[in-house]
Image (tube, rainbow, N blue to C red):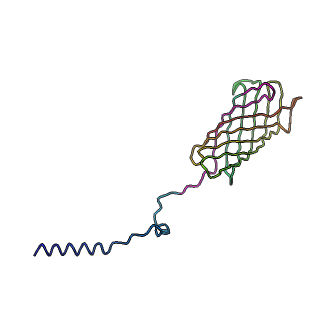
Amino acid sequence: MKKTITTAILTAAAALGFADAPVAKSLSDLSLDRGAPRNMEMTAPKSGFAYFRFAAAESTPTSSVQVVPGLGIGYRMMVSNGAVDLSANYSSAKGWKGESSSFFWTLPKASYVHYLNPTGSQSAYGGVGLAWGGLKSKDDREFEGVVPSATLGMEFFRKSVFRTFAELNVSQPAIARTVSDTFPGPIAEFSIGAGF
């Protein structure tokens, strides 16, 4: 008899316990429930990044090519499907030490670049820029003034904290404050940059 009563009580308790269990919501109901806890955090894309740039520049626009090392710093600020790039750059045959027989500098340089895939994790881009700069070539051509430029490049890891890019810049001294007898030709620079 005790066994039967114990079994009846346990059966009743189990039945009542399962009868009051909440009904599971369907997946579509959960997605519409605004009070449901969120497991994902939404992060806004970065508005820009600072970078260092290492370059190889051809700063002797004559028949004899002379490639010189260069450095640059800048900030790339995202706007719509592109970016505004502000930078300072210097290339010299002797690096940062001593007087050089050839150099090329821009300060400041402002450019606009347009991304072909603005939402992708990597994207090719093209752009135009304008800078105040100076040039001295090995064959004694000198220039200081306004330097327009065109850029083609590729930016990598666009959705991470650390970004890199590789680009080709072609600059043509245009409006001179001072210039030698022979006006210098275009300057080509290939650079690799890393930013955060």
How many discs mark residues in the rendered view?
A: 0
Residue 46 lies within the magenta run: yes
Residue 55, image quadrant: top right
Residue 99 or residue 22, whichever sits in front: 22
Relative horizontal placement of residue 150, taking residue 195 as reference (left or right): right
Q: Residue 52, percent across and down?
A: 64, 38
Residue 64 on image: x %, y %: 78, 24
Compared to 157, does 25 lie above or below? below
Q: Is residue 196 visible?
A: no
Q: Position of residue 41 (x, y in %)?
A: 51, 57
Residue range (magenta): 42-67
Indicate the quadrant containing the N terminus: top left, top right, bottom left or bottom right.
bottom left
Q: Is residue 101 left or right of residue 40?
A: right
Q: Quadrant of residue 179?
A: top right
- Asked if one can make out residue 135 in the rendered structure from this viewpoint, the answer is yes
Nearer to the camera, 56 or 140: 56
- The residue located at (65%, 51%) in the rendering is 118
Residue 18 horizontal side relative to residue 39, left or right: left
Farthest residue toward the right? 181
Eyeballing the image, is 104 above or below 3? above
Direction from residue 134 to residue 39 in the image, left or right = left
Look at 64% across and 48% down and name the residue there. Answer: 48
Residue found farthest to the left: 1
Residue 46: horizontal and vertical position, in percent? 61, 51
Q: Confirm whether the magenta stretch covers residue 175.
A: no
